[in-house]
Image: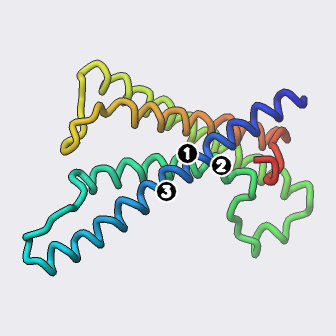
Amino acid sequence: MNALLSVLTALRRVCLWLAIAATAVLFLVVSFNILARAVVDATGGEINFMIFGAIELSQYALMVSIFAALPAMLGTGLIRVDILSRQFPPWLGKIADALWLFLIAAFGAVLTFAFLDFAQTAFARGDQTQDLRWPLWPFYAIATFECAALAILASAAALGFAPEAGEA
């Protein structure tokens, strides 16, 4: 049991740090480009140190951040409509929570297979990002991992094997 909880905690921690790193990249790129845009406007275009491909970089950082945050935040509790759920008897509330977690796990599993297919196709075709010309498949591979983590962690939480929020 401790080994399983350790693996689940490590999985949540990896997703949490991926979300933090991607959000930091997103923040830095957008902030830098806002300042650089002000310099471009102030100098009439004479000085331009905007980041090439910043929009593209921001899009992929946002994708990584969102899909990493989903499994990372499972342990801190999901948003719920208390006006309904607090009316439930405790046993029904637990069943509703487990059902919701299984639905999230199913959603994560469907996304896992979709992103896996996207990653394989992008790899086979040699697809690249539009501006930066980076290979596209690593972004899909990261999203595949994050969605698989969502499916695993939501299933584990539904079955009562979720690490506590403080452990990640």
Q: Find residue 112 and report its horizontal and vertical position in percent.
A: 51, 33
Q: Is residue 51 above or below residue 60?
A: below
Determine which of the numbered discs, if any, sits on residue 72 in the image: 2
Residue 150 position by quadrant: top right
Q: Residue at x 54, y 33 (%)?
A: 145
Q: Which residue is mark 3?
A: 23
Q: Which residue is mark 1?
A: 18
In primary-sequence order, the first of circles 1 and 3 is 1
| Label 1 element class | helix
Q: Earlier in the sequence, mark 3 or mark 2?
A: 3
Give the amino acid at mark 2: Ala
Decide if residue 96 is on the left or right side of residue 32. right
Q: CA distance from mark 1 to mark 2?
A: 9 Å
On the rendered structure, is 147 left or right of 80? left
- Could you tell me which secondary element the residue under label 3 belongs to? helix
Work out whether 100 lies above or below 156: below
Residue 158, position in %: x, y? 78, 42
Residue 140: image quadrant is top left
Q: Amino acid at mark 1?
A: Leu
C-beta proximity under 8 Å, tags 1 and 2:
yes
Q: CA distance from mark 3 to mark 2?
A: 13 Å
Give whichever of discs 1 and 2 has the lower sequence position. 1
Q: Are marks 1 and 3 in contact (CB under 8 Å)?
A: no
Type of amino acid under label 3? Thr
